[in-house]
Every structure is written in C-alpha cells, then in structure tokens.
Image (tube, coloured by chain):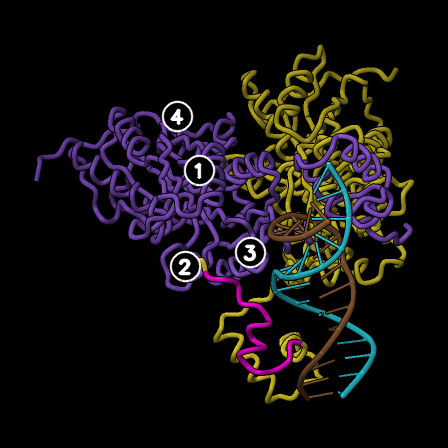
Chain colours: A purple, B yellow, C brown, D cyan
Amino acid sequence: MTERKRVTILDVSRATGLALSTVSNALAGKNHVSEETRATVLEAATRLGYRASTVARALRMQRSFTIGVLVADVANPSSPDFVRGVEDVAIREKCTLLLSNTDGDEERQLLHMRTLLDRQVDGMVLISQHVSSPAVRALLDASTPFVLIQRRNPLFPDDYVGSDNVIGVSEAINHLHALKHRRIGFVRGPSDSSTAGERLETFLAEAKRLRLKVDDELVFKGDYGFETGVAAGRHFLRLRRPPTAIMGSSDINALGVMEAALESGLSIPGQLSVVGLDDIALASFRAINLTTIHLQKRAMGAAAADLLIERIRQPDRTPQELIFPTRLVVRGSTAAPALPEAPRLRA
Amino acid sequence: MTERKRVTILDVSRATGLALSTVSNALAGKNHVSEETRATVLEAATRLGYRASTVARALRMQRSFTIGVLVADVANPSSPDFVRGVEDVAIREKCTLLLSNTDGDEERQLLHMRTLLDRQVDGMVLISQHVSSPAVRALLDASTPFVLIQRRNPLFPDDYVGSDNVIGVSEAINHLHALKHRRIGFVRGPSDSSTAGERLETFLAEAKRLRLKVDDELVFKGDYGFETGVAAGRHFLRLRRPPTAIMGSSDINALGVMEAALESGLSIPGQLSVVGLDDIALASFRAINLTTIHLQKRAMGAAAADLLIERIRQPDRTPQELIFPTRLVVRGSTAAPALPEAPRLRA
DNA sequence: TTGTAGGCGTTATCAT
DNA sequence: ATGATAACGCCTACAA
C-alpha cells in the first residue's frame, strides 16, 4: 500500500525525452505523429503504468464524459431496465453514469440536478421526473443537453422517449371486454405524469367506444407503487358494485392490487382479473403470471441515450420524440369473470 | 437556450472587487473572513448564479467527492438496497455515486475498476465482486480506499461488511427439520463467493448435527440468479428421491426453484417447501409469500460507506470487518412435507 | 483580513 | 513531425 504518486503525462514525457504535447498527441491517436515516436510513447506509458486523468481532461475539454441519470427509485424493478439501456450506449461512448434516486420528490430532484450540473455532466437522462415546474425548467435550460423518458410537458419541445400508450392500453381493455368484463377499475399513475395521463385518456376513450360505463369510483388516483396498488384494490373491492377486472398503473402496482384481492380471500383470475403495465421479469414467473402491457424499457433507455449523444454533438438539432410501441402480453391473471353481472336495462 | 459561459469564482471576484482567494475563502466557509465581506460574496455569488466547478476542485484537491460502486446487476432486486445504503451516507458526505454493473464478469469488473480509478474516485464499494485474482488485487492495491460487501478473501485484511450466515442458515434448516423435513436440497451461490461458501458450510455442519444425510446430489452449484434456481429445481425434482424442501441461494433463486416446481405441477408448500435468502420486498407479497432469511442490506450498504469514509480520512487505520446478523422470516412457502418418507433403518 | 502566485494534469494553439 | 506555452477553475500557501 505504498502511497505512490500518480503517473502523469509529464512523467512519460521525461522518460521518453519527448515534449509534453507530443506525448499527448501520440496518446490521443492524433495523426500528426510518426509511428516510431508513437510506439515509444505507448511503450513508456504502459511501462510506467500511465493512466490519463479524467478529471484533468474534463477541466481542459469542458466535457466530463459523464452522463447523469435521474430515476425515481432503483429499487423499483421498473427503473433498472431503462438504466441498463442508457448504460449500453454510455459504455459504447466511453461515458460513465452518474445515477441518483429522486424518490419522485421534486426537491430531491432539484438537488441532484444541481449536483449533476456542478459536475459538468455532458448530458442528463430524466426518467419519469418532474419536468414542468419553473425551478426544474430553469435548470433544464442551463444549456446542458438532456432527454426525457416517460414524462414530459408537450408545451416544451424537449427530446423525448416514450411509449405508445394507446396501443397497449386499448389492447388490454379490449382483451378484458372480450372476456366479458363490463366493469373495469383503472389505477391512474402520478398526476403530473404525461404518460399516466395518456393512458387514462385512452382507457376512457376506449371504454366509451365499447359502451362501458366508467364511474368516477372506477378510477383510482395514485402512483406507480405497491402501496397505491393495495389501496386501489381495497377501494375497488369495497365498492357496492366492485369491478371484475382492474388495470394497474405498473406491474408493481398490479401486485399491490393482487395483494388486496388475496387479503380479501379473492382468487385471481377466478374472482378478479388484474392487468399490469411494464412486463418486469417477475411478471412472467409462474408464481405471479401477470397479464401485462409490455414496455421496451431497455431499448427506450438506449434510444434516449442515443438521442442525448446526438444532441451533445449537435446542440441545435431539432428536438425529437421517439415513441415505442407497447403490446399486451396475456398470462394467467386475466380470465372471464366468475359471476357475470345480471343484465340491466340501459339508462 | 443561450450558450452562456460558466460563472467562475473570478466573475464573483470582479463583481465584488474582492480578491480571488477572499471569495474562495468566503465561499468555503473559512473563518478568516469578516461577516460583512462574506455576505457581499454570498450575495454576488447567488446573484450571478455562481456554482463551484466540481471538476476544477477535484483536480486541485485531488479528491473527487465521488464514490464508485460496483454491483453485479442493478436489475436484480437484491442489489439496489445495498446501493441505497451507500447512497444514504454519500449524500450526507456530499459525495456522488458512480454506479456500474459488472454482471459478475471479471473482465467487466476490471474495466469498471480502471474507469473508477481514472476518475479518481475517493473510494470504492465492491458488492459481491471478484476479490482474489491477481489482476483485481493489483487494482485494489492502487491506494484508493475500498470496502467489500458480501464477498471477500480472508487472506487479505480488507475492510469488509458481511452478514452472519451461520445464524440465518441454521435457523432455516432447523425450521425445516422441525417441520419434519429430512431431505433438504441446497443451492450454492457462486463458487468464488465467500458468503456462499460460509452458507454451505453452515448448512452441512447443521445437517450433520441434526443427523440429516446430505448426498452430493442435494447440493446444486450455481449463482444467485433465477435461471440457476430453475435449473436447481429441475435437478432436485428429477432425483430418484427428491428433497421435500429446498433452500435457495437468494430470493430470486428461490423463485426459480418455485418456477420449476410449478412447471412440474407441484404445489408450494404442499408438496415442496422453499426457503429464500435476502428478504426482498417481493418476498412478503402474498402472491409469493416466501419464507426467507432476512439480510439488512440497506444498513450494510450504509455501514460499508461509513467504513469507506473512515478509511478515506485515515488511510492507515486497521481494517475492520462488520458482520450483520440475519434472521429467518417464516412465511407461507414452508410447511410439513405432504408425504413423510417411510422410516428407514440407520445405515 | 485580504491579495498574489503557483500548480493540479490535460488539451489546444501556435510556432518551429 | 515536434515542441513551448497557455489555458480550464479552483484551492492554498505565503506575503502584505
């Protein structure tokens, strides 16, 4: 554990007798240097164990080769896939990821955004973060490139990667309708989430088309978490006329609904059908076997990072939006309702 | 989107007419500066929107206020809790986390370690990483402080945070024994994991004490993943005399075992008992309801980070090891075996 | 208490 | 093709 000093480019320079700048050029692979000197430099560099200081380089180049990623909660199985996608291209671009949890809290988000900015990240990927408040906008407009995932404000022309909520949600509701479900409960995600909003709209529109009545009591407002799912499940099951199927705002949320159902002794899908949204690995496990709407999260993360790289290279590019298709994956948590409602006259 | 230039300490200096160093001192909260000038500086700083460059500071102070974290896979629910713990103290210490996935692959790990070193992280937290090979040791000995979590090599006196595998595992096997299980399958984690090794030893020792026979075929070698669990489950269930209970190497692993059981049409815990290890949030959901050994992961992560901070401040401190207790959490995946084995004569 | 100067390790510019 | 020199933005002796 000798406290050896860092080997710098200067050491290499001295060892080879070449000038600082020549060594730098040789190492950077510039073509203005003869093959011979390059070889000398490379040899000396490896021999001395030289490693370029990313910090010094960042200061000089005003580019840190770092991408900041803001996520609500890594511990939630939905997030890591996005992050993995971002990481895929970060590695390709020789960038490193600075990852922070915001817990969906705007203050924490602001804090972390400032930290990222202070560190001069080359860009940021904001996954389901707050995007509209003046405080957030002020930081976003600080001329550091950024890309939004899954949540945006249409008023701002930001680079954005989202999912096509129309296809997935309407497939899901049609699936339930085909199974003869006529009362369907819907859990809405965070009120300031554009994605959650789009899904609800789609749900309502499609329900209308199918002539399903959607009372206010059939829409439960919450977030993407487990607890919301439990609360929603309890709420729905306590209704005088409970729904025979429930669509969660996420898979974890759907698990919460299942939790509530199981605690009431209801069997799934026998007495209640549940649909999730995400298709996390877990959803396909037989013990869960959740019918859900598949999101291409890793691909979305990668696409967002690609967009970010583009914008870093070309700051004045017109903003793009990339919408990824979704699709319903039918598994074992949905089936025909056990007791179809008695036919009623139209109002 | 004006490409405004960065406000530096020099701008604040000029704006206030004070010297560079005075501004720096005032900002850093040094006590060699009058309250009045400090107020002036602070006012000007906020007015101009000054933010210190972490990069420049890192270069100058040779300290990046960054902690590197290596994890096998963020997408595996076991990891994020550790990371959260590390993050808790990182925030307290005004440090940022540089997180990378190594997928349990040593080459990737080496790559990421070099990246972290190049970035001059103040320290590293290695969660279940390779710790013994010469290549890894060479990097570890590069005088950057580090702390190991869940995997170490006793030959090296590193700072280490682990869990007490003895208590948890022996509680589990005794629990199964009390339920009258006599043939118990055991899934062993990665062969180079010290933790996995300790668990197996405990299992074998306790089995011996309880006079349970553990054939070779009752120990399945794999990793902590789902696929290993599935493979282990299939292996065990194909045996001429299959075990009536299986202990997984992790919760995800146990879910894999459940998967294999369910695909064979076996009910849990009716025909097969399963025990996990981790106690991820999921384990407590009714749909899973897994009996498992609880690990205090977030606390362990925080403890590791604390150890790291200590070592950063005091590089010559004697290495410490912190062992966290584990405990069995009995849920619904374990019960008495349906068909107790016919009594047999002792060999 | 405040000001001056040097250097952290690079890369970029400009000369040679 | 190679070399000298000046930044990048900050902290910290040391001098005033």
**A191 displayed left or right of A59:** left
- The residue that mark 4 highlights is A329
Report, in whole angstroms, how far the alpha carbon at label 3 lies from the one at label 2: 19 Å
Q: Which residues are magenta?
A: B4-20
- Quadrant occupied by the C terminus of chain A: top left
**B130 displayed left or right of A85:** right
Magenta run includes residue B19: yes
Circle 4 sits in a helix, a strand or a loop, which is it?
strand
The answer to which of B65 and B278 lies nearer the viewer is: B65
Which class describes the residues within 10 Å of circle 3: few (<14), some (14-19), or many (20+)? Answer: many
Circle 3 sits in a helix, a strand or a loop, which is it?
helix
Report, in whole angstroms, how far the alpha carbon at label 1 lies from the one at label 3: 30 Å
Circle 2 sits in a helix, a strand or a loop, which is it?
loop
Which three-letter amino acid code belongs to the residue tagged 1?
Asp
Which three-letter amino acid code belongs to the residue tagged 4?
Val
- Let me know if residue B128 appears in the view: yes
Q: Find out whether the residues at labels 1 and 4 contact each other: C-beta distance under 8 Å.
A: no
- The residue that mark 1 highlights is A251
Which three-letter amino acid code belongs to the residue tagged 2?
Thr
- The residue that mark 2 highlights is B2
Is B43 rendered above or below residue B245? below
Residue beneath the point at 48% across and 53% down: A144
Residue A116: which disc? 3
Q: Are marks 2 and 4 on the same chain?
A: no
